[in-house]
Image (cartoon, helix red, strand yellow):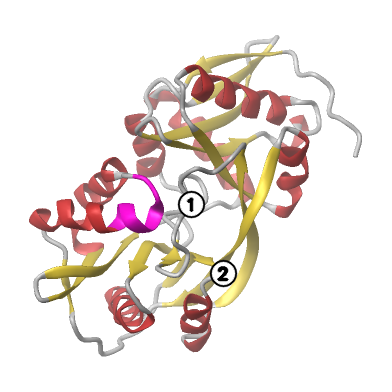
Amino acid sequence: MSEEPKANVDMRVMREADIPFGMKLKNITKWNQLPADWKRFIGIEPKGCFVAVDEKGEDVGTVSTTSYGKKLAWIGMVLVPPERRRQGIGTALLKKAVQYLQERKLEVIGLDATPMGNKLYITLGFWEDFGLERRQGQGRPVASAGVEPMKKSDLGAAADFDELVFGVPRPNVLGMLFRDYPDLCWVAKSNGRITGYAMMRPGFNAHQIGPWVAVDPLVAEELFKTALSAVPGKPIFLDVVVPNESAMAIVRKYNFELQRPFVRMFLGENKYPADTTKMFAISGVEKG
């Protein structure tokens, strides 16, 4: 694989005024984000999302970062217009994100790559961890049991449970998703303790389920059925953890078909591995 040329671009911090540009690039690639997603990226990491600007002053790309304390950070939304690809802009954006995170002393840097992108990431030192599959299906009324709407008072316990599965705390992401879509968040409990939770959010092309985590497949399926029932007749996406055979079995059972694969990658040692036996679907490839 030949190396891309070095891009002659500058980087500036992304602001909310840049969201229409991000949406323009996102729409070209037919990704699922809404303006609210971009707003959350900036809200979580106000100094860590960037726009590439060429020598003519034209905006030519985006990248986001999402930090979970000082332990783990995620890189996402690496977008470049089709006519400006293979000019080194994507590489420059990725390097800018890595530089920003390393300067902030983040211990682990991860991303979820498309098959096309992972070739570039490997050349920059990233290594493959496990596979993900974007699956697409449709909401429908399905009877479920043992699941209740998430309340604000559940957030702390849900975040504690999630930390054991995701590997590091991420109350910032969970809190923002609950704040924006409280009617699309659910918990399962046993003897008052949380045994699983699922969140869903609207998207440009479909509602998206994730995170979806549970102690076992039985709890996971009840949460999944609850999410399906919330948006009957509407398309649904989710990014399923391939090593979790139970997750794969559930989505196949409800006729969720493969849309495209991804691969989870890390730069350097992953000190905080996820428990893939309890992680059924990730929050999204843009933030881990």
Instruction: Determine whether the residue tagged by mark 2 lies in a helix, strand or loop.
Output: loop
Left or right side of 43 for 53:
right
Q: Residue furthest right?
A: 2
Left or right side of 58 for 151:
left
Left or right side of 200 for 72:
right
Determine the main secondary structure of the stretch shown in magenta. Answer: helix
Spot occupied by residue 111 in the image (x, y as percentages of width and height)? 57, 43
Instruction: Determine whether the residue tagged by mark 1 lies in a helix, strand or loop.
Output: loop
Give the magenta-colored segment's residue range. Answer: 162-168
**Magenta stretch: residue 2 in it?**
no
Mark sitting on residue 213: none
Residue at image position (63%, 26%) is 93
Q: Which residue is identified by label 2? A: 243
Spot occupied by residue 252 in the image (x, y as percentages of width and height)? 53, 84
Residue 188: which quarter of the image? bottom left
Say which quadrant the N terminus sits in: top right
Residue 262 visible to an observer of this rendering: yes
Residue flagged by tag 1: what amino acid is it? Pro
Residue flagged by tag 2: what amino acid is it? Pro
Q: CA distance from mark 1 to mark 2?
A: 13 Å
Mark sitting on residue 273: 1
Closer to us: 31 or 253: 253
